[in-house]
Amino acid sequence: MSVQLQSDSSSWKHATMDIPQGVNIERIEESISLLRQFVTAVEIEPVIDVLEALKLDPDNSSLVVQLADEFTDIGPLQGQVLTYAPYIGILVSNNSLGVFADM
C-alpha cells in the first residue's frame, strides 16, 4: 500500500492512496442500514452517500479518502455514527494510518 500526503501550508491533503482489496461490502451495507435506522441527523447524509458509492465501487481509493473527510466534517456526530457503524472507524483509522487490515 502506498499513501502520499502533500502539505498545503498548515493543512494536509490526500494525494494518492491504494485501496485495500477486501473492503467488506456486507459491513458497508450493514453500516448504511443501521445509520438510516438509528441516526436521524441530516448532517450524516454525506457519510451515507459515500458509503453507498463505496458499496458500488469498493476499489475506488478516492472514496475511502472522501469517507474520512466526510466523517471528520460531522464533528460531534462521529460518536453516534461509530456506535451504529463501527466499520467506518476501521476504514477511517486505516486510512489515516496508511495501514489496511483484512476487512
Image (cartoon, grey):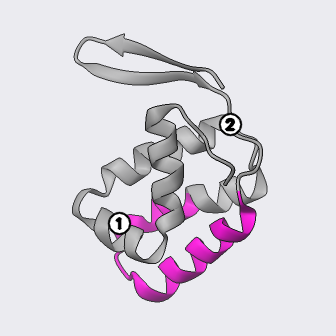
Residue position marked by numbered label 2 in the rendering: 19
Query: Quick one: quadrant of the N terminus?
Result: top right
Query: Quick one: quadrant of the C terminus?
Result: bottom right
- Which span is picked out in magenta? 24-49
How would you rate the neighbour count of disc 1 (Cα within 10 Å): few for under 14, some for 14-19, many for 20 or more?
some
Q: Secondary structure at mark 1?
A: helix
The verdict on residue 35 being magenta is yes
Image point 45% across, 77% down: which residue?
Answer: 84
Disc 1 from disc 2: Cα separation = 26 Å
Residue 73 x %, y %: 32, 50
Question: Mark 2: which amino acid?
Answer: Ile
Q: Are marks 1 and 2 in contact (CB under 8 Å)?
A: no
Residue position marked by numbered label 1 in the rendering: 43
Above or below 14: residue 88: below
In the image, taking residue 91 as reference, residue 42 lies left or right, namely left
The verdict on residue 21 being magenta is no
In the image, taking residue 90 as reference, residue 12 lies left or right, namely left
Image point 77% across, 57% down: which residue?
Answer: 56
Image point 52% across, 31% down: which residue?
Answer: 98
Residue 78 x %, y %: 32, 63
Residue that lies at the very extreme toward the bottom in this rendered image:
37
- In front of the other: 68 or 49: 68
In the image, taking residue 78 as reference, residue 92 lies left or right, namely right
Q: Which numbered disc covers residue 86?
A: none
Residue 69 x %, y %: 42, 43
**Prevailing secondary structure class for the magenta stretch in the rendered image:** helix
Above or below 64: residue 5: above
